[in-house]
Image (spheres, rainbow, N blue to C red):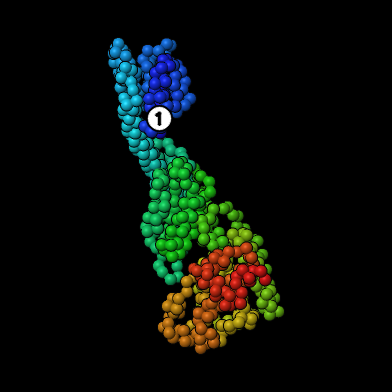
Amino acid sequence: MYNLLLVDDEPLIKVAFQSAVEWGKNGFLLAATASNGQEALHIVETQHIDAVITDLKMPGMDGLALIHELKKRSFIGPILVLSNYSDFDSVRAALTDGAYDYFLKINMNGESIGEHLEKMADLLRVQQQRQTEEDHRSFAIEAQKKENALIHCAQWVTSTAEPSPASNPFSMLPEPLSFPIRLFTVTLIPAKTHPMPALDAVTDLITEVFDEIGGKVFLHTHEDEICGLISNESLVASGRTLDKKLARLQRQVTTYFLDAPVIIYHDKPISLAELRQGYQLCEDSKALAFYVGRSAPLRATAHTVTAQPFHVSQAELSKATAAAAQNADELQMQIAVHTFFQNCAALCMPPQRVREACHLLLERPGDNMIPQETLEQTFKEIEKAPTAEALEQLLCLILQERIGLSKIALSKFKKEVQAVIIYVNAHYMDKLTLDGIADYVGLNREYLSRLFSKETGIGLFQYINEVRMKRAGEMIRSNKQAYVKEVAAAVGFDDPYFFSRKFKEFYGKTPSEYTEG
């Protein structure tokens, strides 16, 4: 709906306009009236006016002076002048100054006014279309400038070498550009059952998610990583927020490529000059995903990793597990391992250092009853453990075996069955299939199924279900506020209803009943 200003010093003309037209049905509202040019200028400055109909002869500032002032003040709406037969010289001057047409008062009636309003509405629509196209062109040009600046600085962002003043990319930009940037990284994690997607395919998906936002660049910074740089102004103009965009990206990558990526982002805009520092913070924050999982994008967080507290935790773990072995105390051992991983999470220790600590613990001489071949298989699974939670479970399993408290003693089984038990305990949260496990241990699926049942006395999938149900029970006991669907997903079930049925078969209670005690 367009707003019209009527300017005329004759009350009868104003009344005629107000009564002759059914306002609101012709695309216009009679927003205001004025009796001379000065009043009209004040209204245009204080209200939103799209079009003006003005008389030429009025006391004070007349119509010609009003048209001149409106154009001087960059008013772009159509101006229609009202005139009498004797006003042709003034009409000619008004058309020259910028009025688009004139209207004889003697011919004024509802139909003729309506025809002129339709013409004015058409002019406004064309005007708006042109303005929209011009805005789009300007936006595209500005976005391209920003993308060029980001591309210009891209290699410098991930470089470890300090740039010389001559090679500093900001000094080589074609023109001074300073604008806030939103930064994020997407790291792909190799899945166990399918190949990692190509970076180009994931980049196409990222481009689609951020399609309506200009001023963006997506860099392949590593063979498994993409770094996104986006103009914050463009993001704000789109009405979207980065965290919601990245949450959508997380869901789509997981859906299309079957495994969740690690997405780290800055929660505040940074400058071009801060890009390298910001990128490094994202890299350092990847350890967060090891501790909290990959179900949602994570904010980059500064952590100061100090060796001393970690060494203390490592020493305490070794001492506590040795005492647990001496006392044959399974609970003591579980508490020691859990405390160690809690400390690692608090320090945000790099995952590889945590894995190395597990290696050192298992290589400790004196009470090691595990065959070397089994240990080597365990070390491989330690390296593959996707989360701290999975690694903690795996370490507990091996330590239970070491102190003779494991329900299934690994050492009495054939090496292929040992490998399956270790694999299941490390990957119970994944989609486990007989084909996948058989491929992993290098056996025929039928033979593996028979061998596992013969060696352990239970079926392979019965064992997988036991591992999952025990872990689910632990999760519910430790967090009674956890949603069933979250627990189900954490132990490898896509369908929470099927999980609840299996849970009741195992415990004799539903998850909610189990929570209540």
| Spot occupied by residue 158 in the image (x, y as percentages of width and height) | 45, 52
In the image shown, does 303 or 496 lie closer to the viewer?
A: 496
Amino acid type, callout 1? Trp
Q: Quadrant of residue 10?
A: top left
Res 360 seen here? no
Quadrant position of the C terminus in the picture: bottom right
Estimate how packed mark 1 is, as few (under 14), some (14 to 19) or many (20 or more) residues with alpha carbons within 10 Å: some
As drawn, the residue found furthest toward the bottom would be 454
Q: Looking at the picture, tell me which residue is in the foreground, 101 or 208.
A: 101
**303 shown above or below 79:** below
- Seen in the image, is 45 located left or right of residue 53? right
Q: Position of residue 436 (x, y in %)?
A: 43, 76
47 and 11: which is toward the camera: 11
Residue 50 drawn at (x, y percent): 40, 28
Residue at image position (44%, 44%) is: 238
For residue 125, above or below residue 361: above
Nearer to me, 490 or 9: 9
- State the residue at coordinates (51%, 88%): 454
- Callout 1: SS: loop
Residue 240 seen from this side: yes
* Residue at figure coordinates x 36%, y 15% from the top left: 56
Q: Quadrant of residue 488?
A: bottom right
Which quadrant holds the N terminus?
top left
The x and y percentages for residue 309 are 65, 61
- Kindly identify which residue carries mark 1: 23
Q: Up-down: is 134 above or below 401?
A: above
Q: Is residue 484 above or below residue 248?
A: below
